[in-house]
Image: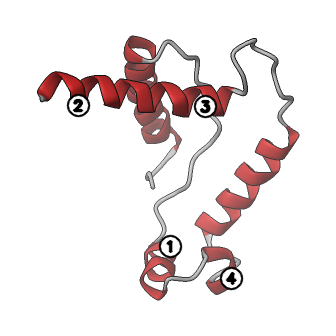
Amino acid sequence: MVNDLAEAEGLFHKLQAVTDRYLEVTLDFAGMVPFDPMLRQSVQKQKPIRQVFPGARSAQAFDRLARDVMSWRRRQTGVGDRLEFFLEQTLRSSQRVVGQTQ
């Protein structure tokens, strides 16, 4: 959770710098989930925010993100789905790090 769009974009740029350096993938900023005490309450109740507090700012943000994700066109990159590729590269990187520390 972040306080505003500027903080969200700053966090995104930090993550993007890491993925650029170690994973060789391109990330796009998809949006943000604003700081919301109701989200913390839903986590404590172990219930989805949409179920417990459907009108909460964070629930609305998740709704927007979900709608946006569903409208994304799938890109054919030749290396598989972008998310699958991202996760695969993340796992490979962590395996390399673990192998180096043993």
Q: Position of residue 28 (x, y in %)?
A: 62, 26
Q: Earlier in the sequence, mark 3 or mark 1?
A: 3
- Tell me the mark number nearer the camera, choosing from 1 and 4: 4
Seen in the picture, residue 60 relative to 52 is either above or below; the reply is above
Amino acid at the residue labelled 4? Gln
Q: Are marks 3 and 1 in contact (CB under 8 Å)?
A: no
Q: Secondary structure at mark 3?
A: loop
The residue that disc 3 covers is 29
* Mark 4 surroundings: few (<14), some (14-19) or many (≥20) residues within 10 A: few
Residue highlighted by disc 1: 39
Q: Residues within 10 Å of mark 1 (few under 14, many from 20)?
A: many
Q: Pointer 2: what residue? A: 98
Q: Position of residue 80 (x, y in %)?
A: 72, 22
Say what secondary structure mark 4 lies in.
helix
Residue under pointer 4:
51
Frontmost residue, 61 versus 44: 44
Please tell me how crowded label 3 is: few (under 14), some (14-19), or many (20+) other residues with Cα within 10 Å: few
Mark 3 to mark 1 CA distance (whole Å): 22 Å
Q: Which residue type carries mark 2?
A: Val
Residue 58 falls in which quadrant of the image? bottom right
**Residue at 44% of width from left, 30% of height from top?**
90
Q: On the rendered structure, is 71 left or right of 56?
A: right
Residue kind at label 1, given as amino acid type: Leu
Q: Residues within 10 Å of mark 2 (few under 14, many from 20)?
A: few
